[in-house]
Amino acid sequence: MEGGSTVTPFGGIPLLLEVIGRSPHPDEVARAIVEGPGQNFGADCAGVMWAAGDKLVILGSYGYLPDELAGLSTLDLNGDYPMADAFWEGEAIIVPTSEVEERYTSPRRPDSRWQRFKKRFEGGDHVNASIHSDGRPIGGFTLNCRKARVWSTLDIACLDAISHYLGMWLTHPDSGVPLELGDDAVRDLVLSARQRQILKLVLEGRTNTSIAHALGISTSTVKQDLSRVMGLLDATDRRTAAQRADQRGLLSAGEQ
């Protein structure tokens, strides 16, 4: 409760659940996010994405102008921007619109999508959160809010709830959304040199601690790289990720 108000951000969740229960078009889901729980945050726009290879594919959106959406079919998961951070870290990343370009490199590019709509949301918040299924990130959603606010723990819990329900919707067989990551989906995936080294050592049967020692990096860095690769290759464990990368020739990429 803030300022004596009894309004709860969870008040809009039933609308979202009612909509996703109809196996709707993703645009309708984005609209339900805005018109449901998003109303408590002053959200005007929302986008829903799922991960394919090293990209986030935009499935549906609501509230954005045509020129703001131009060329936004995919987002690079290896880019330096809030949505990529939210996907990999597994938690909501909320940045005042006015500070996005100060904190992140990618939005500063002249051709960045951010240049298309930042003025409309000046003074607001840019909200990004991952969508999870079985503890693994499979996509993300974003909100653009007209005014900046102090986000309470209850607000963050509501964003987590949205993530949970979107994960259930995206992975349901009746959702109509193809989540399989076949070879075509990852044909353009490029792993970093360090990620290739780590996966090769995984195939040798090395532990994370042993890998960290061999490469002169921290164990947490090894775990973070493995988590990213597992997400990109739709693998539930490190060895499966290494085997899939090897089968697709990703471990030899960049070698002469």
Image (cartoon, helix red, strand yellow):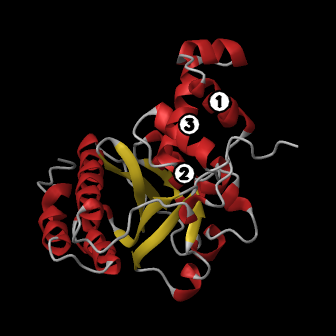
The mark nearer the N terminus, 3 or 2, is: 2
Q: Position of residue 16 (x, y in %)?
A: 19, 68
Q: Quadrant of residue 168?
A: bottom left
Give whichever of 196, 124 is nearer the camera. Answer: 196
What's under tag 3, amino acid-wise? Ala
Decide: marks 1, 3 in contact (CB < 8 A)? yes
Name the front one of labels 1 and 2.
1
The mark nearer the N terminus, 1 or 2, is: 2
Q: In which quarter of the image is residue 22?
A: bottom left
What's under tag 1, amino acid-wise? Lys
* 29 relative position to 229: left or right: left
The mark nearer the N terminus, 1 or 3, is: 1
Instruction: Give the residue at x 40% y 76%.
Output: 60
Find disc 2 in the rendering and name its residue: 84
Give whichever of 110, 138 is nearer the camera. Answer: 138
Q: Label 3, secondary structure: give it.
A: helix
Find disc 3 in the rendering and name its residue: 242
Sort mark 2 into few (<14), some (14-19) or many (20+) by Cα contacts within 10 Å: many
Q: Position of residue 225 (x, y in %)?
A: 58, 34
Name the front one of labels 3 and 2.
3
Instruction: Give the residue at x 67% y 48%.
Output: 249
Q: How far apart are the two marked residues, 1 and 3, measured between alpha carbons? A: 7 Å
Q: Label 1, secondary structure: give it.
A: helix
What's under tag 2, amino acid-wise? Ala
Instruction: Give the residue at x 56% y 36%.
Output: 242
Find disc 1 in the rendering and name its residue: 200
